[in-house]
Image (spheres, rainbow, N blue to C red):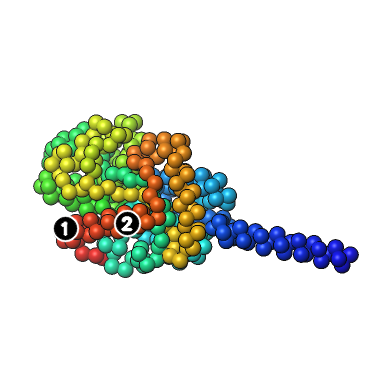
Amino acid sequence: MIDSLYKTFTRRKTLAAAACLIAACTGVQAQTGGIKLMVGFPAGGATDVIARIFADKLKDQLATSVVVDNRAGAGGQIAAQALKAAPADGSVLFLTHDHTVSILPLVVKNPGFEPAKDFVAVAGFATFVNALAVSGGTPARTLNEYIAWVRSQGNKGNVGVPAPASVPEFLVKVIGEKYKMDLAAAPYRGSAPMMADMLGNQIGAGVASIPDFLENHKAGKMRVVAVLGNTRQASLPEVPTFAELGLAGFEDVPYYGIFAPAGTPKATVDRVAEAVAKIVAMPDVREKLTAMGLAVGYMAPAQLASREQAYAQTWSRIIKASGFQAQ
């Protein structure tokens, strides 16, 4: 009896040790809670939709549960602070776009995190462009018609933006200055509530990413009148770029990526990055992301880190030139 118990105990110890060794070598999380994929914006917005696409695929690639965790508020700042405080074991990841990691540190005096110090880039998977769209209740169908409409309203207009002190807000300022209009950016807590107000004609226009506008643009519920970037977008070939319309200087396009807390083991980062690369190559994923207006393309950890830093440098110059003071 004692020999039998001893053999059972020894066998269990051996199996447990082997499981731990496999987890250490592959970067699979040893904890039972799976992975939290944080998003810094409310459910229903483009970033949330994208996160859910990746969560569904990551669970199969990493053989563990992956749950989207919405930590909305302050343009992703709350989620970024939570990422900094999270355990560096791969159990918490952060899917975000440029605003939180590249722009917030430029416009907030004490954001509570330093991307280069507190985060590690895991993988990028797409770029996109911001756009100006007008609400369905606005008669304009082109940028020039929108300008004429604003002037008919006393040369004043409110333009929604998904977050305060964001690239869309600075773009509103530049558009107003360029066309000598008194435009005021109206910040929201994410694109979803902004879109709700645009659909309800509570606000005449908004600046956000193409993924935020595309579905409603195609349905005729709002109209995208200009896009950023070097070229017209495949998802909106009929819409001109701002550069075509005489507003140059906004050709550097934002990005989407996944980040982890600093100190996350390289083996874990590499395993997640490998999983993202496989997911990005899946035809159904590419189709979904492309349909949302994203330019799909995998970025390895070092590439994403370089992209984040370069984008921050570009916008640092623009923000300083605007006279904006960090709050």
Q: Earlier in the sequence, mark 2 or mark 1?
A: 2
Measured as percent of width and height from the top left, residue 280 is found at 43, 43
Residue shown at 19% from the left, 59% from the top: 317
Q: Which residue is mark 2?
A: 306
In the rendered image, the quadrant that contains the N terminus is bottom right
Picture layout, residue 300 above or below residue 223: below
* Nearer to the camera, 201 or 132: 132
Measured as percent of width and height from the top left, residue 49 is found at 43, 44
**Position of residue 31 in the picture relative to residue 140 (left or right):** right
Residue type pointed to by label 1:
Ser
Q: Is residue 91 visible?
A: yes
Q: Which mark is residue 283?
A: none
Q: Is residue 181 visible?
A: no
Marks 2 & 1, CB-CB < 8 Å contact: no
Mark 2–mark 1 distance (CA, rounded to whole Å):
25 Å
Residue type pointed to by label 2:
Ser
Measured as percent of width and height from the top left, residue 99 is found at 32, 55
Mark 1: few/some/many CA within 10 Å (<14, 14-19, 20+) = few
Measured as percent of width and height from the top left, residue 125 is found at 39, 47
Q: Which residue is mark 1?
A: 322
Residue shown at 47% from the left, 55% from the top: 270
Residue shown at 78% from the left, 64% from the top: 9
In the rendered image, the quadrant that contains the C terminus is bottom left
Outermost residue toward the right in this view: 1
**Position of residue 246 in the picture relative to residue 219 (left or right):** left
* Nearer to the camera, 29 or 291: 29
Camera-side mark, 2 or 1:
2
* Nearer to the camera, 12 or 90: 12
